[in-house]
Amino acid sequence: MLEHKNSDRICGAEINSITSICDKNLLAARIRLIFLVSDTDDGKTTGTLLKLYYDNKKSNPLPFGKVEVRILKGLRDDDVKAFKQQGLKNLVREISNEVRKFSPEAIAINATGGYKAQISFAGMIGQALEIPVYYLFEKFSEVIELPPQPIALDLAFWLNNYLLFENLESEQIIEKSEIEENLESNYFESLIDEEADGEKTLVSLSAMGVLFNERCRLQFAKQENSILSLIPQDDTEPVRKPISLREDHGIDILQAFAQKICRSPYVKKIINSLPFNSRRTNPIRRTTNDGVVEFVLTWTDKGLGLCIQTTGRNKAETNTIALHLQKEFAENN
């Protein structure tokens, strides 16, 4: 392949499309090239071949600084269930992880190659995460940018159900009976998958649900300050805010953290301390409509936490404050 021009059809659609993207100066620099391949022998072989091609700095006229191949578990054409429940979700997660690490402005999606369903879904991922998506049609000589596809965004809905989205994202499968009251909104119909398991019904985020969650995270990060400006603040001096803790919960660690978190203008008081919970990975354990946030100190070896009264007047405001506190105080720095 290296003996041919990289625009020759014999080099294949992936190389042809990358060549066109570079020739059109759509990349400011060739820093990273990540091939997301199907969970099949053909996918893995193709990924290995493409990595060898682009790793050859001597003969390849378009080398990249770093070339990676990542297998998307479940993305295979002989298992419909795995394709739907794992493959497409993992496609969203891999691209979302790159957005979190490097920002949308540093990324482009080349949707050429792979399964047809991926092309359409790649367009939605690009629109949701604000990334340009390029595609080389079989009879075209150069790539085109796929037009945006409408992605509904209801940030208030996401904020009201933030912990449910986080639980579904981290645990992936939950019994429907545990979250029945949260599923009353028709909004959830396209965001979750249901599967019968004996007498139980299991619920997980659909691929669209994973994408919706990622898009809302991105938008919230951009709008956090504007949203916070609409929430009332408590102007009490931090040292005068009441702190109530259980003495058997390691008073020194908790007292210091409680005093620190009382500096937030969105915190009214510390109601109590929380017991050990080894399963918690998300600092936000629970929130209520009346402004209470249960916040776990994940950076301690005891997994203790605080029950905090915030200025939140409803679930959306309380979750907004919880997310703000997580960013400001979750790490011991």
Image: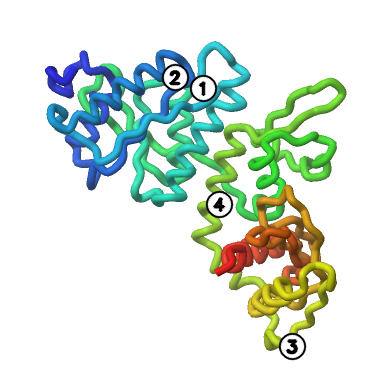
Image position, residue 280 (x, y; %)? 71, 51
Which amino acid lies under the numbered mark 4 shown in the image of this protein? Arg
In front of the other: label 1 or label 2? 1
Mark 4 vs mark 2, CA separation in Å: 28 Å
Q: Is residue 316 visible?
A: no
Q: Secondary structure at mark 3?
A: helix
> Going from the N terminus, do you reach mark 1 or mark 3 first?
1
Q: Secondary structure at mark 2?
A: loop
Which amino acid lies under the numbered mark 3 shown in the image of this protein? Arg
Q: Is residue 136 above or below residue 175?
A: above
Q: What residue is disc 2 on?
A: 115
Q: Relative to residue 297, is residue 96 drawn left or right? A: left
Q: What residue is disc 1 on?
A: 75
> Going from the N terminus, do you reach mark 4 or mark 3 first?
4
Quarter of the image for residue 176 reads top right
User: Mark 1 near mark 4, Cβ–Cβ under 8 Å?
Assistant: no
Q: Relative to residue 199, is residue 5 drawn left or right? A: left
Q: What residue is disc 4 on?
A: 217
Mark 4 vs mark 3, CA separation in Å: 34 Å
Q: Relative to residue 125, is residue 319 drawn left or right? A: right
At 80% across and 41% down in the image, what residue appears?
179
Image position, residue 79 (x, y; %)? 58, 14
At 55% across and 52% down in the image, what residue appears?
217
